[in-house]
Amino acid sequence: MKVPASWLREYVAFEGPVEAVARRLVFTSFEVDRIVRRGVPDEDGNLGLYRVGRVVEAGKHPNADRLQLCRVDVGEGEPRQIVCGAWNFGAGANVAVALPGAVLPDGQRLEPANLRGEVSNGMILSERELELGADHTGILVLPSEWQAGTPLGDVLPLGDDVLEIETGYNRPDLTAIYGIAREVHALTGAELAPPPGRDPAPTHEEPVDVVVEDLERCPRYIGRVFRDVAVGESPPWLKARLIAAGMRPISNVVDVTNYVMLALGSPLHAFDRTRLADGRIVVRRARARETIRTLDGQVRELTPDDLVIADAARPVAIAGVMGGEQSEVGPETTEVLLEAANFEQLGVLRTSERLHLRSEASTRTRRRRRRRTRPSFSSSSAARASSATPTCTTRCRSGRWCACGRSGRTRWRACTCRPSGSGRRSTGSASTSPATGR
């Protein structure tokens, strides 16, 4: 498991170098294989050579059709001339600039260069060159309100120390960044922040249909519906955190679920609600020879021992293991149902082993123990996922959840969650809000 030190410090304010804390953790909690520095080196004032730049002029290079000749204000009074090969920006854009003398994440030192007869006094950077993402097709365009000359390290996570650790199978709490923060708090006495995630008050009601047929295998299921979703790229800070933690950014919706899973150790899943038959969720056992095409593109045959998440017609996910392609969130998605649930770990283990299918979700679910992972952790994860966007808000209301936000306003909707064939009630939720990725 990879643990970014900046993320850990967000939850526990320990003092001193991360190496000192790592040495103590080796003797009390888990193995620390190594500490890796990723991103921009923080040595000899190197971070000060990375600035927010505003493009004053941008036009075709006189001697090269594929290059732009730009003049960029980096807060020095006189704009710098920089040659750039990307065309996804123009005059007035804010960009990330490395000045001559800067050491790039790959160790290369930047010097003034003569490109086709024009001097380039710096470099306009893509997110991949900063290790903030994988995109290298264009320049990283920054928010327009950022001031030219602002140190880039003040507004973007340019570098981080990452602990690579090995945790014991009997410590599922250590599969979460917050769980590791609690361990550091117990070891050092450093102040521990409250668990992330907060729920505002409800304002509107609407029924949402969630049925749990097997309460032994799924003691709690929370579903929240987000309307008016705009699926797109996540902001740089979120992509940088996921990459540092060893995960690939996909989209704002999917990245939020992975971010919360890493933070709190409780797997989440997002469905495109418009692809769910009747908009319904049924947690049940699979039927004999029932099949599902999972997110890895494989068609898998299920057995009655497998627990599935189904809609009114078919399975849409293998509980605690992996979702299905039919309900996958894509660029056209406008309505998302977010799942946060507790699944019985031995059932997830059997299904995962029989299908030879391991995922980050199944690894965490199968390591849970009732005495260490309470069902209430699902609601904490659902709350954190909702608060990952400014307008996503939720609150518990007698065990039922629901919120809907449109144009910055929040409307609450009540959730119906019916147990099937049992006198026990299960906990369900539904909430809706615009998703922006942060």
Image (cartoon, grey):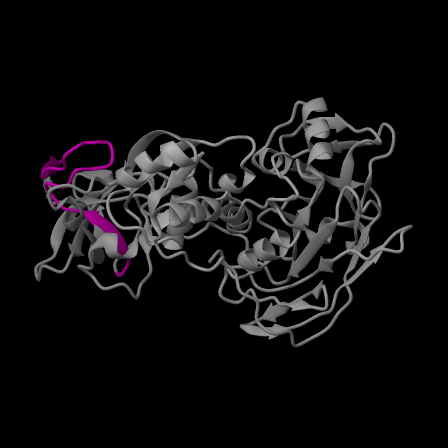
Q: Horizontal placement of 429 versus 265: left or right?
A: right
Name the residue at 18% across, 32% down.
108
* Residue 290 quadrant: top right
Against 363, residue 391 (above or below) is below
Q: Horizontal placement of 236 versus 367: left or right?
A: left
Name the residue at 84% across, 31% down.
304
Q: Is residue 173 magenta?
A: no
Name the residue at 55% across, 38% down.
172
Residue sitting farthest toward the bottom = 203
**Residue 168 visible in rendering:** yes
Q: Quarter of the image containing the N terminus? A: top left
From the viewer's side, name the closer residue of 81 and 153: 153
Name the residue at 64% across, 64% down.
432
* Residue 203 quadrant: bottom right
The residue range painted magenta reads: 92-115
**Residue 293 visible in rendering:** no
x, y percentage for residue 4?
Answer: 37, 42
Q: Horizontal placement of 166 versus 394: left or right?
A: left
From the viewer's side, name the closer residue of 318 and 180: 180
From the viewer's side, name the closer residue of 257 and 15: 15
Q: Is residue 100 magenta?
A: yes
x, y percentage for residue 354?
Answer: 72, 23
x, y percentage for residue 45?
Answer: 12, 46
